Amino acid sequence: MVAAAPPQGCRATDFAALAKTQPTPAVEAAHAKVGPDTIAKFLFTSGSTGQPKGVINTQRMLCANQAMIRAGLAFLADEPPVIVDWLPWNHTFGSNHNFGLVLDNGGSLYIDEGKPLPDAIAATVGNLRDIAPTVYFNVPKGFEMLLPHFEADRRLREKFFSRLQVMFYAGASMPQYVIDAWQQLAVNTTGMRITFISSLGSTETAPAALARTWQSVRTGNIGLPLPGVELKLVPRDGKLEARLKGANITPGYWRAPALTADAFDDEGFYKIGDALKFDDPADPAKGLLFDGRLAEDFKLATGSWVSVGPLRAAFITHFAPLVRDVVLAGADRNEVAALVFPDLGACRKLSPGLAAEIPAQTLLADRRVMAEFGRLLDLLLAASKGTSSRVTRAILLAEPPSLDIGETTDKGSINQRAVLAHRSALIEDLYAGAPPPHVIVAGSAQTVEVD
């Protein structure tokens, strides 16, 4: 369908002609059958904490959630949004949140064929050279991978910031150094900081449930419940488990009554599986902090709970920019250890003189790379206050997380359980009494002079 200038050699329907079509009684009858509880579609969860589940999405969910989003982000009604978006439509962020937002506010959606992957990020950069968005949506990994391209290209920055109102991230916590770098780019380009906003939700919540519409000092602040969403915080294992109720919540999972029953409590609140805490307990209006996925947390052999989400974020920030992601191990062990997905480009800078084409495994085994990770691991250990916040050993992984076997989703989120299961031999290496050479052990770092 086109508004003008149909492409040569392709069949196209003129929108103006389509708009003149008179609906038949059959169309009117079909439309009349659609109500708030009519199933609009099924969306599968991303599988970041387990096997994907088929979530029922009703018309009520989709319409109510767009009304909630517009009430929370009122500026969207002031100017039709322009969005350049790669997020897949088989997931709720791209298809429900962003696609619905454009429809509901009369905006324009430019479909980006790129992705936050080494061999696909260039396509996103090219599209952002052509189209200046008014709101830019991405996952933290996407913002991180775009940074070096924007730092190296002033014209790209000028185009991108020319009419940008806010930058929006969701799907994971954003490392502080990534936000700081983007803020510096905005100031250098426009003289002003850019507002980063965020949200919390899931496929089951259509997806937006909480949103932060103001600039926050803490990157983990996900704001407050959107209008129409009721939030209940339930004490559990020393944390506050979030449970939600509202017109945007799914009625359940398709043909899975047991899963559906387990997803709701006896008051009808959906158990989203996230823990939250107040940014300022004395002032709830300052918003809530994401406190990790309950399904990812585990107990050490000492009985101490490890809060994976905050520790993972602290680890990535501490090792920035050397680490892309990390999976923490330690269930029923005495200490926490880490499987590290390094940033190979940043690691190469630690070893000047090495050939650019050397295998990743060789690079990561270089004594200068190992020594720097050991030094940083020592510093992290020294700042830790207890066994549940200490990371004592680490392995640098040359093989990236696999999408095919479920270690990562197509949005770039890590499935911790899948990584631990598929790399179980490395877990044994981490906890070996006499650790092999590829294990970095805190307290054994040595100073290495660069040749």
Image: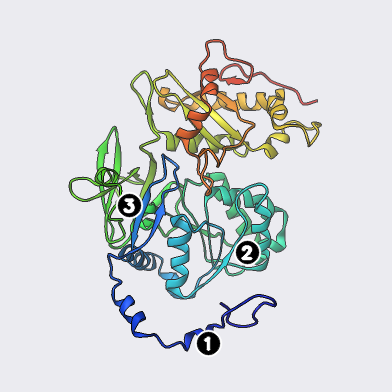
The residue positioned 40% from the left and 35% from the top of the image is 296
Q: Secondary structure at mark 2?
A: helix
Q: Which mark is residue 254?
A: 3
- Residue at left 46%, top 49%? 171
Q: In front: 330, or 41?
A: 41
Q: Could you tell me the amino acid type at mark 3?
A: Trp
Picture quadrant where residue 125 is located: bottom right
- Count residues near mark 2 (Cα–Cα under 10 Å), then give few for <14, some for 14-19, many for 20+: many
Q: Is residue 332 above or below residue 61?
A: above
Q: Say above or below: 238 vs 173.
A: above
> Which disc number belongs to residue 32?
none
Quarter of the figure with the N terminus: bottom right
Q: Is residue 411 visible?
A: yes
Which kind of residue does numbered mark 1 sit on?
Ala
Give the labeled residue for mark 1: 17
Kindly check if marks 2 and 3 are in contact, taking CB atoms under 8 A apart as contact: no
Q: Identify the secondary structure beneath mark 3.
A: loop
Q: CA distance from mark 2 to mark 3?
A: 41 Å
Secondary structure at numbered mark 1: helix
Please report whichever mark, 2 or 3, sits nearer to the chain's N-terminal start.
Answer: 2
Of all residues, the one furthest to the front in this rendering is 26
Q: Residue furthest left?
A: 266
Residue 30 location, quadrant: bottom left
Q: Is residue 386 visible?
A: no
Q: Which residue is mark 2?
A: 160
Q: Residue at x 53, y 27 (%)?
A: 423
| Mark closer to the chain start, 1 or 3 | 1
- The Cα–Cα distance between marks 1 and 3, rounded to whole angstroms, is 38 Å
The residue nearer to you, when weighing 339 against 451, is: 339
